[in-house]
Image (spheres, helix red, strand yellow):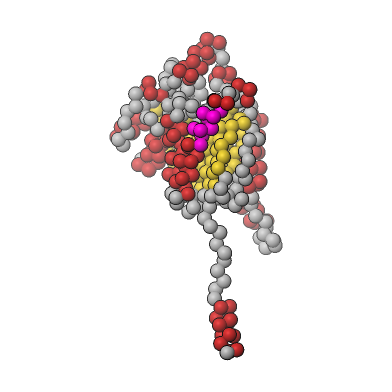
Amino acid sequence: MQKLVAAIALALLSQPVLAQEAPPKWSIAIHGGAGTLDPDKMTPERRAEYEAALQVALDAGARVLAEGGSAMDAIKAAIIPMEDSPLFNAGKGAVFTWDGTNELDSSIMDGRDRSAGAVAGVKTVRNPILLADTVRTQSEHVMLMGAGAEAFAAEKGFAVTPPEYFATPARAEALERMKADKLSALDVDHKFGTVGAVALDMEGNLAAGTSTGGMTGKRWGRVGDAPVIGAGTYADNRACAVSATGWGEYFLRVGVAHEICARLRMDKEWLETLAAGVNPHPVWNAMKSQAVADRVMADVKSLGGDGGVILVTPEGDAIFSFNTTGMYRGRATSGGVNEVAIFGGEDKGSSTPDH
Ligand code: ASP
């Protein structure tokens, strides 16, 4: 009997020790633009309208991830309802150019292989994020613009959406006010209203996408950061996925989205190098990722720019950083966080899916 017990114990001990595997995580963050939002001018009805629209987008993306779908599918699922909503400056509800047209910019990036697609200045594509993705998957290019992008869309079977579809009275009025009072885009358009989403799926892949009408009264084919890979959008499985919103010229000059990803990657590499053999092994955490995003946004501010970013990391942290009074935003994680917020300091849930 004793021999049998000893044999069983020996057999058990000689089994390879299986590490307790953490359940796969997912995480998503969305934005609907950042800007100088005034809490006193936000009526409860208006707030409820924006919160409901953000919630629809967040839930659409979160559902894809919770069901095991890809980060790429999740960000498209989140961005499409915001492009379709007249509340945001993307798709329907896009701001007007100086000439009274609506010209749309969008970009998307897959962190798995860093494949990317972007379109600028399109006028007849209902969901520019889908055209950007088609550039990524069905062309040899990264960025197409204007009439060429529309010819490509036609070739790929996109329906031609009449330009009137994008126009809304509120955005038309903003252009008129700008012209009448000789204001700048920032004076009339205190909230920018671009939309974006970033996600981590259960396979550990990251993705980012952004869509916008740009800035009110833009002229001469002006293009901002949103469709520029590295400025408004970036995703790299080794680092993070970022989507930006704000005064595009400054985001272009800083190369915000790539700058955040590059700093995160390098800081983590440094940590690994410096901590080799150190016990207990220091770990990367949400606070460190937040600090990196905040530093880059401080850099934007030091040049005179404002706006914000959303990011998701390989650890699943869903992070916001903005230097404006508000940013329409939301985040959801496999840990049970699900929240939307507008003004600074309104976030309640933890940024990490482990809590
Ligand atoms: N970044 C966008 C642009 O400059 C505007 C925005 O974020 O609302 O075109």
Q: Residue furthest front?
A: 45
Q: Is residue 122 left or right of residue 36?
A: left
Which residue is located at x 44 percent, y 46 percent?
Answer: 64
- Report the number of numbered marks: 0
* Front-lying residue, 279 or 113: 279
Highlighted magenta segment, given as a residue range: 47-55
Magenta run includes residue 53: yes
Q: Position of residue 73 (x, y in %)?
A: 43, 44
Q: Main secondary structure of the magenta part?
A: helix
Q: Position of residue 193 (x, y in %)?
A: 52, 28
Q: Is residue 109 left or right of residue 157?
A: right
Which residue is located at x 60 percent, y 48 percent?
Answer: 352
| Quarter residue 257 falls in | top right
Q: Is residue 345 above or below residue 41?
A: below
Magenta run includes residue 174: no
Q: Is residue 297 visible?
A: no
Q: Is residue 186 above or below residue 330?
A: above
Q: Position of residue 215 (x, y in %)?
A: 51, 23
